[in-house]
Image: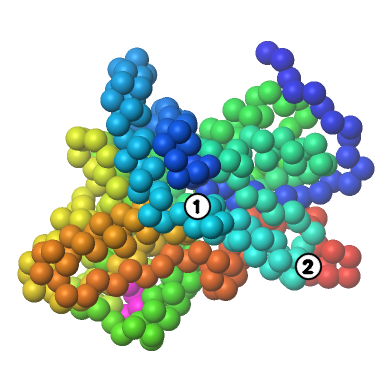
Amino acid sequence: MSFKPEPPLPTDRSTAVVLVNLGTPDAAETTAVRRYLKQFLSDPRVVEIPRAVWWFILNGVILPFRSSRSAAKYRTIWTEQGSPLMVHTRQQAAGLGRLLAGRGHQVRVEHAMRYGNPALPDVLQRLKAEGCQRILVLPAYPQYSGTTTASIFDAVFTHYRQVRNIPALRLVRDYHLHPAYIDALRQSVQAYWAEHGCGERLVMSFHGVPRRTHELGDPYYDECLHTASLLAQALGLEADRYLVTFQSRFGRAEWLQPYTAPTVAQLGRDGIGRIDVVCPGFTSDCLETLEEIAMEVRDEFLHAGGAQFHYIACLNESPPWLAALADIAEQELAGWPTRQAGLLE
């Protein structure tokens, strides 16, 4: 094995926080989407199918037909600044940096993507070249799953297999029960209700994973339920006022249930006039929230007889969420010398 060339030893051991999100295509075009999907769907953490079989399915069926359809969906949410997920993640990192600095910490905050750009290994390599000797990796996923958080960890470990002088590393596993995260969700929902009124049901839609992953020991399902229960409690909701569902099912295998779209359609058929939908597992609005939920699932509800569908935006860069991120980062940074002189606790 050959190792990457080492930069000169730093004279100042600096600290960095890397906020890592899933990723996004570089453009809402078929070529860019195909490149992104190939990287994403080639990850064995994401698709647990024998590699030889999956290679033919991915390259022979999925990429040739799904790429253009996905690109069309991305175009419905694309902004002048680019992908909403990229815009929000970048702004979250900038806001987190400002808050940590305001609390007296000398840390750099960067954003990175597990798939696409800026690629996580590239960001880690650049931080090392610039003298960072302590790095906290903070996934943008509140709930842990082998399909998401563990894949980030894989990318970190794979990168450092080629590095001779590895910096001090800390990796945040989850924060699905963190009081500041739950409170940021509560404030987001209550602020929406204060402006738009409250629906008859609150649907909490989390990203789905294959049911088999849960049966094999992945804790994601339980962590989603724990988050939902705490949020409902914080909002003062009785059990009949909210539902937990799972979206973004892919392929023919059974995924975590109940599925969001058919559940919402049934609410419409049952005579529920207004529902509010929030996606607590997504910290940034993206294709799965803005197109799948706010457009596709909305249409399912209205076509089934529902009258009003309200989508409550993700936490994005709201002040309560930035404060929660700062709380989480401070907790994980504890013990590292990040305080500025004169501001030591």
Measured as percent of width and height from the top left, residue 133 is found at 78, 42
The magenta segment is 231-236
* Marker disc for residue 16: none
- The residue that label 2 is drawn on is 104
* Furthest-right residue in this view: 11
- The residue that label 1 is drawn on is 83
User: Which image quarter is the N terminus in?
Assistant: top right
Q: Amino acid at mark 1?
A: Ser
Q: First in sequence, mark 2 or 1: give its number.
A: 1
- Residue 186, by quadrant, is bottom left
Measured as percent of width and height from the top left, residue 311 is found at 33, 69
Q: Residue at x 49, y 57 (%)?
A: 79
Is any part of residue 48 visible from this angle? no
- Residue 275, by quadrant, is bottom left
- Residue 63, by quadrant, is top left
Q: Amino acid at mark 2?
A: Gly
Q: Residue at x 54, y 71 (%)?
A: 318
Q: Main secondary structure of the magenta part?
A: helix
Mark 2 → mark 1, Cα distance in angstroms? 32 Å
